[in-house]
Image (tube, rainbow, N blue to C red):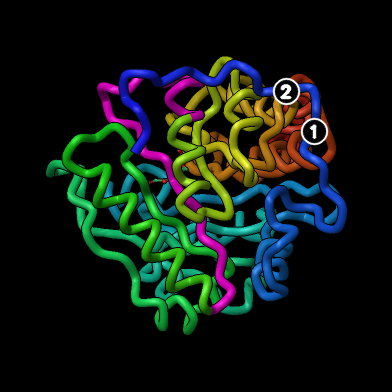
Amino acid sequence: MADLDDLREGADFNTSIPVKQTGFHIKGAENLPWGMKDRLNRIFNPQTGKTVMLAFDHGFIMGPTSGLERIDLTIEPLIQYADSIMCTRGILRSSVPANCNKPICLRADAGTSILTELNNNVVIDIEDAIRLNTSALAIMLAIGDKSMEAKTIANLYQTVDKATRYGIPVMGVTAVGTDMARDARYFGLASRICAENGANVVKTYYCDGFEKVVSGCPVPIVIAGGKKLEEYEALDLCYRAIQEGAAGVDMGRNVFQSEAPAAMIQAVHSVVHEGLTARQGYQLYTELKEKS
Ligand code: 5RP
């Protein structure tokens, strides 16, 4: 137990010194066994080390939210442009073609909805995750939430225990409570706690000082897009996150609620993998949108 009367905020992140990586392109994965590496390698492009994960798991908590009413019509055409997809087992089985050939990051926890308080109390049976040939499992952590923090950390911990047995990586998903500051201190704390408890990837949010969040986290960080923004702003968010060390995006609403979702995901892809600036990405978005 740390001495609570002497908590010193980290200040020496050495953000200009990249973590030494010798044999493998994914941060913190060098010591993992082959199956883990293979699954992570399917998610993170070995040429760029980055990923564009298309997230459409929102229905597990929000129901048929805008853009996800008909997954078959709105999401299926986008899957081809994603490096990986994130969804629930129900949507995977019912609405994602089994020949899409994309690595699956499976939303592996459940137990709450937007109608009630956070009550996250179920994690997937590992055998079901194996049946679905998942490349990673995603577990939400509510760091700072008095009633749910310990429960969700335990969910992550136990999921890592089960998934590691079968070489399946786990992504820690940092949920932000309404009373949490959305700053580098909070996201740095939450991300590090995910990694310390065994997450192989962390999904969090971009914020000022994001490079410190990345630097203090020993595994790759992907950013969620969050609420729908104007397309230029969303591309700028991606650009800044990538420039400051994100290993990719796990983006949902800013793609599937865009005026031109297929154009948007392709523009995001170019910003993430080809280093396009937000302006260049937006130019690509408008060109593709006009052609569509
Ligand atoms: C929903 C999630 C989403 O997958 C995540 O937030 C990414 O989606 P968006 O870009 O829309 O925020 O975890 O529970």
Residue ID at (56%, 15%): 208
Residue ID at (45%, 60%): 87
Gap between marks 2 and 1, in whole Å? 7 Å
Q: Residues within 10 Å of mark 1 (few under 14, many from 20)?
A: few
Q: How many marks?
A: 2
Secondary structure of the residue carrying numbered label 2 = loop
C-beta proximity under 8 Å, tags 2 and 1: no
In percent of width and height, residue 86 lies at: 51, 57
Q: Amino acid at mark 1?
A: Pro
| Viewport quadrant of the N terminus | top left
> Does the numbered disc 2 mark a residue whose Cβ is under 8 Å from ligand 1?
no
Q: Is residue 12 left or right of residue 6?
A: right
| Viewport quadrant of the C terminus | top right
In percent of width and height, residue 290 lies at: 72, 34
Instruction: Identify residue for label 2.
Output: 15
Residue 136 shows in this picture: yes
In percent of width and height, residue 211 lies at: 65, 24
Secondary structure of the residue carrying numbered label 1 = loop
Q: Is residue 133 magenta?
A: no
Q: Quadrant of residue 210?
A: top right
- Magenta segment boundaries in residue numbering: 166-188
User: Residue 18, which numbered label?
Assistant: 1
